Structure formats: C-alpha cells, structure tokens
Amino acid sequence: MSNADLLFRSRQAVWHPCTQMKRHERLPLVPLARGEGVWLYDHDGNRYLDGISSWWVNLFGHGEPRIKAAIKAQLDTLEHAMLAGFTHRPVVELSERLAARTGLGHAFYASDGASATEIALKMSVHYWRNSGQPDKHRFVHLQGGYHGETAGALAVTDVPLFRAAYAPLLRDNLQAPSPDWRAAQPGETPEQVAERAAEGLARLLAEHAPRIAALILEPLVQGAAGMAMHHPSYLARVRALCDRHQVHLIADEIAVGFGRTGTFLACEQGSIRPDFVCLSKGITGGFLPLAAVLTTDAVYQAFYDDDAARGFLHSHSYSGNPLACAAALAVLDIFEQDDVLAANRERGARWHALFSPLASHPRVRHLRRTGMIWAFDVADAPAGFPGAFFQAALAKGVLLRPIGGTVYLMPPYTMRDDEARQLAQGALLALETALVDGAEEKDVVVA
Ligand SMILES: *Cc1c(COP(=O)(O)O)cnc(C)c1O
C-alpha cells in the first residue's frame, strides 16, 4: 500500500478526532505502517520520534514485548465475556492489584477516560441519593480542568473551544480557581498560589456545599489546559475542605496516573486518598482501551442492598475485557520488574538537563517539569503556531503537538538519552520555524 493511497482513502472514509477535516486538503495525514520503541514508521520508511507517547498512552513506547506476550497468552483462553453475572482471573487480579496501589478496594470498568469520568460523577450523585441527600447533585471543577468530551464529562471541562457548540447539552456546574503556579503575583511562591486557590474553593464550598456532590480535579498537572502545574500542598488543602463540607473528591488520574508525575498516582505527592480515582490512558501501555474507577468501602456500602434500584445500574459492553485487563496486568508487572519509578527519577533528571537549554531561547517562558512531563510557553505565539510547530517538528522526524502557545514533552519512559537529545533539538528547530510560519498558518491544531 502506498502513502498516497492511504491518505486519500482515510480522508474519504475516516472522520479523525479533534480535527477540522478541511485542513487535510493542504496538510497530509501521516500514514503509519508500524511502531517500534519510541518510533512510528510510515510506508516510505520515514520515522517519527513519539515525543508525546501518542496522546499520553504509550508509556513504554510501541510494541513492548511483555505486554504483547500477555495479550497473546490471554487470547488463547478467553478473549471476552460479559462482566454482569460472570467473572474471570484477569479482572479479579487487576482489581486486587489496583486496590493495593490506590488504597481503594472497589473497581468499576469502562473502555475510555471520558466514561470513567461519567461513572465517578454518577456514582457520587447516586451515593448521596442513597444516603438520603438527593439535593447533593452538583459538581465543582477547576478553571482549565479537562475530564473528557462526553456530555457529562464536558460539563466539568473548562476548554471553551470544546464546549461552545454543545452549551445546550451541558449542565451548569461550579468552577473553582486554578492553582496553576504561573498565576503567581510578584514575590508569590507556587505554594502561596495554591493557598490562594484553596481559599477561593473554601468560599465556594461554604456557600454551595449542601447541593454539591463532588469536586473533580486533575492532581498536580492540568494536561489539556496546557500542562498547568500546581504545588502538591493544594491537594491536602482540597482534601481537608472536601471532608469539612461533605463533598466527594474525584481524582482524575487518567493522564497523570501510572508514574507520569513521578509517583504511581499523583495524589501520593499530596499524601491524600481521594474518594474516587479515574484511571485510563497509560493503564494498558497503549495496547487496548480500558478505564477503571476505584472507590472506597463507604461508597460501595451505600449501594449494597436488597433493592436493585440502590445498586449502580451502569454498564459498558466491554466492561473488564480480559485482553485489556491482561495488558494492564503486564503494565503493573513492568512497574515492578523494571522498578520504573526509581528508573524514571534518574532518567527524568538526565532528560531535564537535556531539555533545560530550551529555556534560554528568548521566546520561551516558564520551562517547567513535573516527573516525566515537561512544558514551556511561547511568548507572543502567532495564531497558527500549534499547527505550524506540529508540521515543522514532523519535518524533523519528531512528533510533538503544542496546545495553543504551550509546547510539551511527554515521552515514553523507555526513550534513550540520545533520543531525548534528538527530541530537544527537534523542538528547538520546530520552534524557530513555527515562529515564522505560524504567522501565515491559518489552521488550528487544538490538541
Ligand atoms: C484524556 C483525558 C480524559 C479523557 O480520556 P479519553 O480516553 O480520551 O476519553 C479525561 N481526563 C483527563 C485528565 C485526560 O487527560
């Protein structure tokens, strides 16, 4: 199959996500033939260094042999069975091991992140209803928060471009200030910014708590907002406020879980246990769609009853799919076998030394890092900057997709140091090109 043939057929038959399809009249899709390690290859043998782990999911790059082998082994016994009325070893083991990792002993499964958000929101509201407080059904989210794009998840997402067209579908929630440390006033530390944001939240809860079911946030790094980072002290303040006001805390760890911020869960850095944790993205290392929502005994017990209507009557056809669970178990094995968190501490420090020189570019602001996430903002980025940067980086053999004027690096954990050096060089060259081309580029790449 040729590149050109695939491009044409894809434009005819495939509606690509998060894309104004008309842009592909001028800018070609990248037709992939295969992936190996941190590289994606097209049909002509060109290769691209996957600097963003393919939208943050391929933790160990492409084709990781242990995950592949686990899926193949599972394929020989049970590929799928409905999870209502049935169970199987992969889903039981995964639930036990995620419980040990999170301190939350009850796991509910779906197939993607947005569904995990929907589940956590619905469970919270239903918990309060079962507990005799049906008026607690509103949600608080943070300024700049992102939790997925189905109607319920979009309603707790603060990205105007994604929301505007669907405003009539979205219920009215409450928004708390972002603890993003870039909002620091002169002399203010990230911890003080976090404190100021927590005070804003405290006022909101003081006024509305009797009607609020839950607060949902992305701990430590608000990804889609442009890798907005905050001080871990914010998490402890939020936990205390939620306790005081009887509001659930939902930690959306879909992007930041599985070691991305340096700890297995980002919440660990605030020494807190949320009432719900949402996991997806890295959970299968990019092999199969899977999401899990984990929650407390207290929540679980509020549903446990002779009355069916008090149960959580929510389902997805592929809930707890054995192949996906086997992939997730292999990912957890890799965390243990390779001591991934410890290895990442050293890798992260070495890569930070390689990425830091980007800060000396005159247009670069706020070069920042949390664990294995790096980001910087481009001062006065022209309107077409993200699209122009994406194209320029591809031309250098590097896959990076800025969010507005923010460039971020979220590499597979398995990238070698010489590849990290290539990534930094590619980013710098793409930056120079995009500052010029971006002024002419009219199409917008949004994420
Ligand atoms: C990606 C993401 C989601 C949505 O996950 P999908 O699998 O794309 O539906 C939700 N929350 C956060 C923080 C995310 O990064």
Image: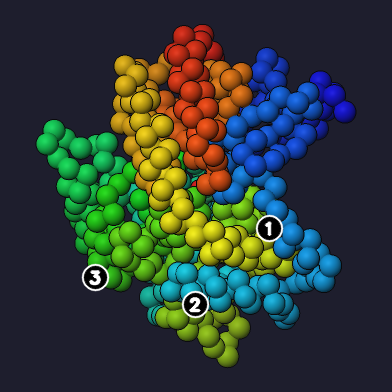
In the image, is the residue at mark 2 within 8 Å of ligand 1 by its beta carbon? no
Quadrant containing the N terminus is top right
In percent of width and height, residue 316 lies at 68, 64
Q: Are marks 2 and 3 in contact (CB under 8 Å)?
A: no
Instruction: Between label 2 and label 3, give the one nearer the viewer.
Output: 2
- Residue receiving disc 3: 244
Q: Which of 67/375 is in front?
A: 67
Say which residue appears at 43% left-offset and 38% top-offset. 351
Q: Are marks 2 and 1 in contact (CB under 8 Å)?
A: no
Say which residue appears at 31% left-offset and 16% top-offset. 362
Secondary structure of the residue carrying tag 2 is loop
Amino acid type, mark 3: Arg
In this rendering, would 111 be left or right of 372?
Answer: right
In this rendering, would 398 be left or right of 199?
Answer: right
Q: Earlier in the sequence, mark 2 or mark 3?
A: 2
Secondary structure of the residue carrying tag 1 is helix
Secondary structure of the residue carrying tag 3 is helix
Amino acid type, mark 1: Arg
Whether residue 311 is visible to the viewer of this picture, yes or no, is yes
Q: What whole-number distance in Å separates the C-alpha atoms at marks 2 and 3?
A: 23 Å
- How packed mark 3 is, by other alpha carbons closer than 10 Å (few <14, some 14-19, many 20 or more), is few
- Residue receiving disc 1: 66
In percent of width and height, residue 398 lies at 58, 27
Residue 98 position (above or below residue 51): below
- Residue receiving disc 2: 105
Amino acid type, mark 2: Gly
